[in-house]
Image (cartoon, rainbow, N blue to C red):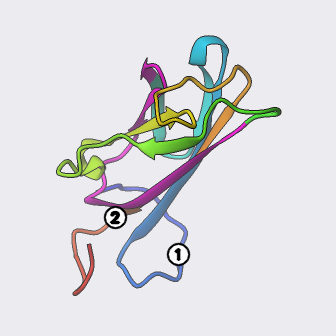
Amino acid sequence: MANRLMQQFSAALDHGVVTLHGYVDVGAAGAVSAFKGLSVAAVAKSATGVYALTLSDPYPAMLGASAMVVYNGTSAVGAVHLKQDPAVDPGPAKSVVLNTLDFAGANVDPDDGSRIYFQIVMRNSSYVPAGGV
């Protein structure tokens, strides 16, 4: 469970909802040139179009995630997916893997000068309300 001072009173039906967001700047050959994000300790490229985000804190569960690529031109990236085994919760593992895909669905590196924006929603409570995930 993350032990940080969180902003209070987000309107959520779940308990202890935490939103992490940031971005990854992409350089030549898809290399990570910089990243920013509170509670994001590291970002590393492991293969073509595959970026592992290491979180600073463990969370009991992940509730969702989204990402997009922004580029000043026509981007080679058509979609960003989470590349994760559904049976492995990335919250306790402290890792989320983003996969950038071209328009045909194949792995592709974002263009030099691209930025990958991400938002990750975690539960910072071990309590799961009735009907919760």
Q: Point out residue 120 in the picture as x, y percentages from the top left corner.
A: 47, 54
State the residue at coordinates (77%, 33%). Answer: 74
Q: Point out residue 36 in the picture as x, y percentages from the top left corner.
A: 61, 37
Query: 98 above or below 109?
Result: below
Q: Earlier in the sequence, mark 2 or mark 1?
A: 1
Q: Point out residue 83 in the picture as x, y percentages from the top left corner.
A: 36, 40
State the residue at coordinates (58%, 18%). Answer: 30
Q: Amino acid at mark 1?
A: Gln
Query: 9 above or below 68?
Result: below
Q: Point out residue 63 in the picture as x, y percentages from the top left corner.
A: 36, 64
Residue 65 is left or right of residue 117, and the answer is left
Give the farthest residue toward the right: 72
Whether the magenta-drawn stretch holds residue 49 is answered as yes
Q: Nearer the viewer, mark 2 or mark 1?
A: 2
Q: Which residue is mark 2?
A: 124
State the residue at coordinates (45%, 34%). Answer: 41
Q: Is residue 49 visible?
A: yes
Cα–Cα span, label 2 and label 1: 12 Å
Q: Nearer the viewer, residue 118 or 91?
A: 118
Q: Nearer the viewer, residue 100 or 113?
A: 100
Quarter of the picture containing the N terminus is bottom left
Whether the magenta-drawn stretch holds residue 53 is answered as yes
Q: Which residues are magenta?
A: 45-70
